[in-house]
Image (cartoon, grey):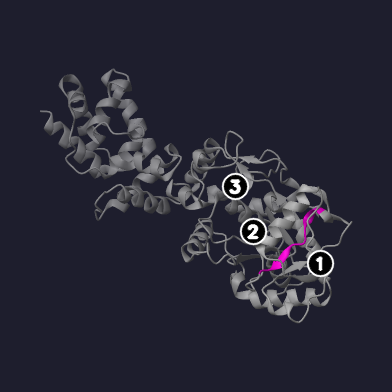
Amino acid sequence: MTSPSSTVVTRFAPSPTGYLHIGGARTALFNWLYAKGRGGKFLIRIEDTDRERSTDEAVKAIFDGLSWLELFGDEEPVFQFARADRHRDVVNELLATGHAYRDFLTADETTALRDQAKAEGRDFVSPWRDREPSVDDLTKPHTVRFRRPLDQAVAVDDAVQGTVRWESASLDDLVILRSDGAPTYNLAVVVDDHDMGVTHVIRGDDHLNNAARQSLIYDALGWTRPTFAHIPLIHGPDGAKLSKRHGAQAVHEYADMGYLPEAMRNYLARLGWAHGDDELFSDEQALAWFDLTGVNKAPARLDFDKLAHVNAHWLRLADDDRLAKLTLDAHLGRGRALQPDDEERLLRAMPFVKDRAKTIPELADQTAFVLQARPLALNEKSAGLLQGESGQRISRLRERLGLFQSWDVFALEAELKVFAEEEGVGFGKIGPSMRAALTGGSASPDIARTLCALGRDESLGRLDDALQQTK
């Protein structure tokens, strides 16, 4: 679990007490980008020491979210609870060197003394800090506290926040081992980061105060501190702390809403970090560009319009076969009964519709017309567009298209333009009637693209059906 000091090693260390939050996903991404962009290692640690709140479902949700984002650790994940014996060994080491002490105060006694100290305007210090326990005392339940140095400034050179200082007296003597023998968070984090060879601790700035406490533990153990980098949290569009009222918070919700993982990586990387004015960039570019100096100190604001813009860009670049499968899943999720040729139809349509959508559900909306079963049910408005002179014109166009073999969008556009000119009308007199016959009036791209999306046989069949119904 150790790495050479020359290798950059970062870690993402979530607590499995719920879903993978969007803020946690960005933290994971920043750690991944920083390490992988420097030829280093990205590690994952599950901080499951809170046994009452940690659940297997939450662990699964975290790994499912990371897997969807394609952020994979370079080694097997570490589970913090399984390392409790190692943590206790370090506590014993701190006791042996005088950097920790046993505290035999009960919880009620601690509360009373802390309240008294507050009322008298002084910091709380356990009376056991400078008291040697007797043999009888050692048989009683007790905690172990870290003996912080008094009257000493603690400085952390943070790669994002700059140099931050605390007075050690304000940090309290931290409990590092509970009375039930369970190591506490700040002790376990230091030991695990050291043993895993972590060189850079990149995390939310809500952990900034922990950096002071953890630095003192590093110093007491004679271990080299990692580089700390505390990134601002993500706020809602209104500048308030992100909450349910702002919309989706969990990574799986964004997947369900039809965003692509590469779009989420692009957007999250730009959320609180900048490389000039670049908004749209690939993973390769992000890996080459990302540096902690580009991380903003101010909280980032979630912007769903920008996210949709980024996702639309990556939809246009995505493989059609992949999009067809995702879009079919969306249709099936809406209750469609699977048909043998559904995926084939969607794949044929994809090049002509994917630039009209910002999410997968929108892509499902835009492709609904290609999955309609023949004959299409024409409503009164659509049927009306195929009556009289308009219907006769569509009949002539159908005959002409039946002789047309080059079912290419550019060739079809040219053919439709020539037909309109020969008919002596603008295409506005033809388009609505054609759309009614081909889609029943459903949303679709321009007529040449609609014809290509449907394919030659399906297009001609739908025109025949519509003209037959309106005779």
Task: Report, in whole angstroms, how far the alpha carbon at label 1 lies from the one at label 3.
Answer: 46 Å
Question: Is the N terminus in the top left, top right, bottom left or bottom right quadrant?
Answer: bottom right
SS for callout 1: helix
Q: Which mark is residue 129?
A: 1
> Compared with residue 73, is residue 112 higher up or lower down, i.e. above or below?
above
Q: Which mark is residue 32?
A: 2
Give the farthest residue toward the top.
424
* In the displayed structure image, the side of residue 450 where residue 189 appears, left or right: right
Q: Earlier in the sequence, mark 1 or mark 2?
A: 2
Q: Which residue lies under the disc numbered 3?
A: 268
Q: Is residue 302 magenta?
A: no
* The magenta segment: 170-178
- Pick the front one: 172 or 234: 172
Residue drawn at point x = 70 percent, y = 49 percent: 205
Give the farthest residue toward the bottom.
135
SS for callout 3: helix
Q: Is residue 115 visible?
A: yes
Residue type at mark 2 is: Trp
Q: Earlier in the sequence, mark 1 or mark 3?
A: 1
Residue type at mark 1 is: Arg
